[in-house]
Amino acid sequence: MHGVRETHTDVVIFLLLLGVPTGLGHLYLWRRLVVDTTRPRTLGRRIGTLAIIGAFLVLMSALVVTRRVPPEYGKFFAWPGFIWLAVLFYLAIALGVAEIPRRILLRKASAAPVPVGAGAEAAEPVEVVPDPGRRLFIARSVAIGSGIAAGGVVGYGMTEALGDPHLLNVPVTLDKLQPSLSGFRIAVVSDIHLGPLLGRSHTERIVRMINEQEADLVAIVGDLVDGTVAELGEAAAPLRDLVSRHGSFFVTGNHEYFSGHEQWIAELDRLGVNPLRNEGLTVAGGIELVGVNDVTGKSYGDGPDFGRAMDGRDRSKPVVLLSHQPVQVSDASSHGVDLQLSGHTHGGQMVPFNLFVPLQQPSTAGLSKVDNTWLYTSRGAGFWGPPVRVGAPPDITMVELRSAG
């Protein structure tokens, strides 16, 4: 991201991780959408080839240029590039699903066997001569159908990603909670991802939706920004208008460390959003609120420290932990945390990525339990990369604490 130091090695690794697979994806699309649907050495094939090359360059511009220019300029590369990335992804899936029926239809479209040899009686091998016209018709039909399917999915995903976050209500029963505090409501929001595609209006909408709920406490659990304070300070400014009975609190996510975490900690403090950096406090006289740094902070000398965060906490009261990544729940459980509030996963953001989240995290989205610790994972209120959410709508969650008594 612009304003954040990147080494030459970082750029090379980034290009290899994203450039190689997207390059192969474009090669596959070129075979199926251009080569299979046009005749050799025709104008249509030349135009299609140039279009695929241009699409690849647009995508690489979004991946590389937006990391090195301010958001007000980066958006001109990010919008077309990241939308195309989503289309590329779902086009590849649609074409892959159509591969078997395509091959079956192509086989049936072949001409009748023609004997090879002298005379019909000759016991010679036969060859199957494909009908070029039918092959083109099948290839073009598959290409058009796949394009319609991919476009429909991406269009739907954009309406989800750019629309209002879903407002969820999740009750959680805590054995240690005093009956007088039953009904205590925490507004949980994560992964807002201010940047080239999401700006001040996105923050204003989130603040409005949270304030309408009249929460007792607001918890922002990481990945607020994708850029520096100089670039996105104005976009984050509406956070100063958050209203709750016991204040607003913040813990770092991995993207804060990519964006200048120290400056953002100071900026949020200035806006009245209290950073919790491996520390805790007692709220409402009966809830121990604790926050730990994201695991990415280890590489920046600012990693999580549960011992320090839990030091001095009253273990007879319920401990509510703010931690960006669900994977930290194992440490939370070993330290006696009753409820962990997290984000990071985006719920997978785009199906079928949700199937791969469990390879790294213990929860994709929603409420679950690990040992004696409740874990709530928000799908987040923003998005990263493509402005698309499929099967994982954005959310703001009202977690309602209930007493077992």
Image: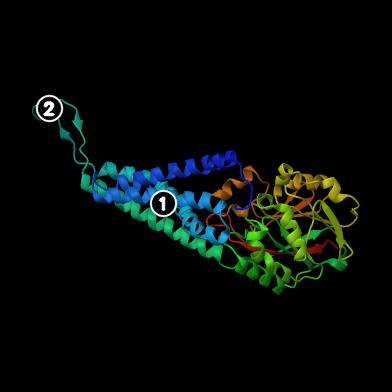
Q: Nearer the viewer, residue 143 or 405?
A: 143
Q: Nearer the viewer, residue 244 or 355?
A: 244
The residue carrying pointer 2 sits among few (fewer than 14), some (14 to 19) or many (20 or more) residues within 10 Å by Cα, namely few
Q: Could you say where residue 383 lies in the image, as x and y percent from the top left? A: 59, 57
Would you identify the image quadrant in which residue 128 lies?
A: top left
> Residue drawn 80% across and 66% down?
247
Residue 101 makes an appearance in the image: no
Q: How is the image coloured?
A: rainbow
Q: Secondary structure at mark 2?
A: loop
Q: Could you say where residue 262 lies in the image, as x and y percent from the top left? A: 74, 53
Whether residue 379 is situated above or below residue 15 in the rendered picture? below
Q: CA distance from mark 1 to mark 2?
A: 49 Å
> Residue drawn 70% across and 55% down?
222
- Please say if the residues under marks 1 and 2 sit with CB atoms less than 8 Å apart: no
Q: Quadrant of the C terminus?
A: bottom right
> Residue drawn 34% across and 52% down?
143
Q: Could you say where residue 144 lies in the image, as x and y percent from the top left? A: 34, 55
Q: Nearer the viewer, residue 168 or 158?
A: 158
Task: Give the number of the mark in front: 1 or 2.
Answer: 1
**Residue denoted by label 2:** 117
Residue 321 makes an appearance in the image: yes
Mark drawn on residue 215: none
Pick whichever of labels 1 and 2 is earlier in the sequence. 1
Q: Amino acid at mark 2?
A: Gly
**Residue denoted by label 1:** 55
Q: Amino acid at mark 1?
A: Ala
Q: Secondary structure at mark 1?
A: helix
Would you identify the image quadrant in which residue 179 lies?
A: bottom right
> Residue drawn 58% across and 50% down?
354
Would you identify the image quadrant in which residue 300 lies?
A: top right
